[in-house]
Image (cartoon, helix red, strand yellow):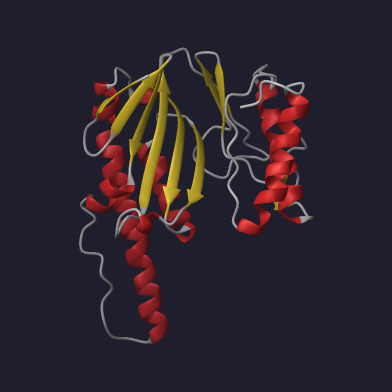
């Protein structure tokens, strides 16, 4: 692999035809977010609502700044916006998810990609950071799969993204939750049951494009509580062991 600089705070590295770009929390914090301080006065409830709106607006502004700089960064890496396969959207507060989703949809409308949206303590990396992005891109052709309606097969999309993209011989599965596909409600049984169901969904969407799970390259699991790590890790390990025949797991 190799490394290099991108535009507007983006950094990139390339390996085996796949380009990885990162817009880190430090760049997000430095992005022109505008004066989003809430006005003083009014009731405590009103001030809290104003503060929440200001935080959401600042997060959206950082997302817009990152996406505005993305085409130049992709071009510097020899790729284009239409070749984006996967976006990891890291946010400081999932309470901003709806506002960020609307902005993301308007900014990435012509760039269908798989996506994961994860809440992380970005302020620990850079004060004022509310958004960070990680983008994977590869040369065409790009295949994609969308699940747009309720079914017994896999959960429908809950945002402007694809469930699966594939290029360069690699499938990229969007972030999966332990949702019952027919109801879009979390499965009962806690983190272990959710992890097992999310893995089943991943396998289902891969099969939708005729892709298998015998040679996985990466499996990333995000947990809310540290106390759930052991059982979620066990579920992932068991799934990989079965799918890889006891070897070749990432």
Location of the N terminus by quadrant is top left
Q: Residue at x 32, y 59 (%)?
A: 57
Q: How many marks overall?
A: 0
Q: Nearer the viewer, residue 56 or 213?
A: 213
Location of the C terminus by quadrant is top right
Residue 239: x, y in percent? Answer: 74, 33
Q: Residue at x 34, y 25 (%)?
A: 13
Q: In which image quadrant can residue 4 be found? A: top left
The answer to whether one can see residue 154 in this image is: no
Residue 146: x, y in percent? Answer: 59, 30
Left or right of 60 on screen, residue 211: right
239 relative to 232, above or below: above
Residue 115: x, y in percent? Answer: 50, 37
Q: In which image quadrant can residue 74 be found? A: top left
145 relative to 17, above or below: below
Q: Residue at x 27, y 53 (%)?
A: 29
Q: Nearer the viewer, residue 158 or 20?
A: 20
Q: In which image quadrant can residue 11 be found? A: top left
The answer to whether one can see residue 176 in this image is: yes
Left or right of 119 on screen, residue 4: left
Residue 169: x, y in percent? Answer: 55, 13
Left or right of 111 on screen, residue 74: left
230 relative to 137, above or below: below
Q: Residue at x 37, y 46 (%)?
A: 132
């Amino acid at each position: 692999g190799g490394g290099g600089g991108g535009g507007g705070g983006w950094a990139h590295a390339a390996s085996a035809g796949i380009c990885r770009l990162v817009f880190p929390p430090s760049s997000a914090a430095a992005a022109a977010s505008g004066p989003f301080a809430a006005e003083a006065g009014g009731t405590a409830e009103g001030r809290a609502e104003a503060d929440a709106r200001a935080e959401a607006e600042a997060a959206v502004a950082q997302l817009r700044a990152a996406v505005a700089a993305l085409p130049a960064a992709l071009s510097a890496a020899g790729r284009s916006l239409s070749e984006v396969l996967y976006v990891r959207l890291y946010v400081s507060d999932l309470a901003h998810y709806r506002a960020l989703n609307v902005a993301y949809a308007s900014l990435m409308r012509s760039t269908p990609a798989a996506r994961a949206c994860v809440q992380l303590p970005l302020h620990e990396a850079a004060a004022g950071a509310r958004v960070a992005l990680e983008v994977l891109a590869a040369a065409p052709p790009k295949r994609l799969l969308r699940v747009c309606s309720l079914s017994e097969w896999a959960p429908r999309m809950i945002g402007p993204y694809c469930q699966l993209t594939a290029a360069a011989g690699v499938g990229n599965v969007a972030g999966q939750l332990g949702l019952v596909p027919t109801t879009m409600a979390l499965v009962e049984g806690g983190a272990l049951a959710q992890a097992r169901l999310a893995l089943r969904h991943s396998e289902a969407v891969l099969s939708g494009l005729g892709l298998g799970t015998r040679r996985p390259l990466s499996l990333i699991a995000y947990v809310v509580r540290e106390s759930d790590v052991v059982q979620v890790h066990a579920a992932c390990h068991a799934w990989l062991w079965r799918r890889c025949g006891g070897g070749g797991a990432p």
